[in-house]
Amino acid sequence: MEEATPQTLAPLDVGGWEPRLCETPAVPRGQLNVGCFLLLLLLLFCPVPSLQAEPKPVPRVQAIPEPHDEVSFQRDGVEIARYRAGHDGFRPFIYPVIGPSGRSLTRMGHPHDPVTHSHHNSVWMSHQFVNGVNFWEDRAAHIVHVRTDKLEDGMDAASIETFNAWQDKDGKTLMNEHRRTGVKVLDHGEWLLLVDSQLEAPPNAPVTLGQTAFGMLAVRMAKTIGVNDGGGTIRNSEGGVDEAGCFRKPARWVDYSGPITPQASEGITLMDHPQNPHFPTPFHVRNDGWMGASLTFPGEIVIEPGKPLRLRYELYIHAGIPPVDALQKQWEEFSHTEWVDFGRK
């Protein structure tokens, strides 16, 4: 067999074209250096979009949840008040309530009768007759902290919302409550404590808050602030002074002030909101160091199912013993504040 003879291709006629490497025009050395310098400036000084989000401002005022359903209200990391659920007692309450001096302006219990006045829990809400059941004193009925629904922080305020069940000695719920407890900081170490309460009757079971001087919101002052023990003073919006001039008298506000350190006097103003029933409410005050807004002293209040009772109070924690017109101005600002909307009927 004859071997195949390899075929060779004829050269391709490209009209005199010859392959060569790609060439770029030469750049003078000086121009190259200037270009690199300008690029470096752009990288150094032109803003480059960050791939990481900017940190958010840290709130000055915070509600810090802690064990046992307690909440620490803090300003710049320092506690000014503490919400206590009261699981080992009979009701939620606020203690301490720190004044501008750094000391608590409230205390637990009567300084000379701690047994029968164990229910004096600094700042607390309660009532003597709820369908005839005594929630005021430390007996068998309990205001049970069921849960914390909401916590909010901010640059000048923080708050918590809680749900409570008012239960008799057998654990039967007579009344439900949504409560908001908030703080708002002011200048010079002063601040506000705001308490909003929405009381609700169970379905098909009206609730009667009976006539009494004991309930709804009360304050047990520090011993040294009391008129008897420390030489403090009580004043109200109507010009009354001390127990003789303020006891169970209707008023927009009552102020209890007195010495808290050897160098400083401080106090708390308890304010009634104009939309509260029976406004202006009578205040039950004593020279032995406590004051309370007596919601139903003028008469009983019936809470019908589906028609909750809404209440609002403010406590002004202040330095010194402010003049009456300054306290009145603080109340006027409070009187224009809006109700808290718990989002429930």
Image (spheres, helix red, strand yellow):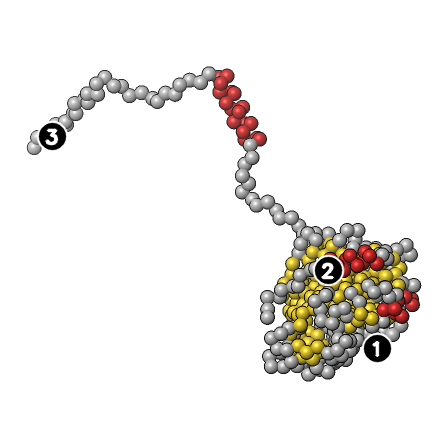
Contact check, label 1 and label 2, Cβ < 8 Å: no
Q: Position of residue 192 (x, y in %)?
A: 75, 59
Answer with the quarter of the image where residue 174 lies.
Answer: bottom right
Give the Cα separation between the discs numbered 1 and 3: 126 Å
Q: Which residue is mark 1?
A: 116
Q: Which quadrant, please, contains the C terminus?
A: bottom right
Q: Nearer the viewer, mark 1 or mark 2?
A: 2
Q: Position of residue 198 (x, y in %)?
A: 66, 70
Q: Badge 2 local density, few (<14 within 10 Å), some, or many (20+)? A: many
Instruction: Tell me how many marks there are.
Output: 3
Q: Give the amino acid type for the residue marked by disc 3 in the picture.
A: Ala
> Looking at the image, is mark 2 or mark 3 earlier in the sequence?
3
Tag of residue 334: 2
| Residue that appears at 70% across and 82% down | 131
Q: Is residue 212 above or below residue 228?
A: below
| Residue that appears at 90% across and 66% down | 227
Q: Nearer the viewer, mark 1 or mark 3?
A: 1
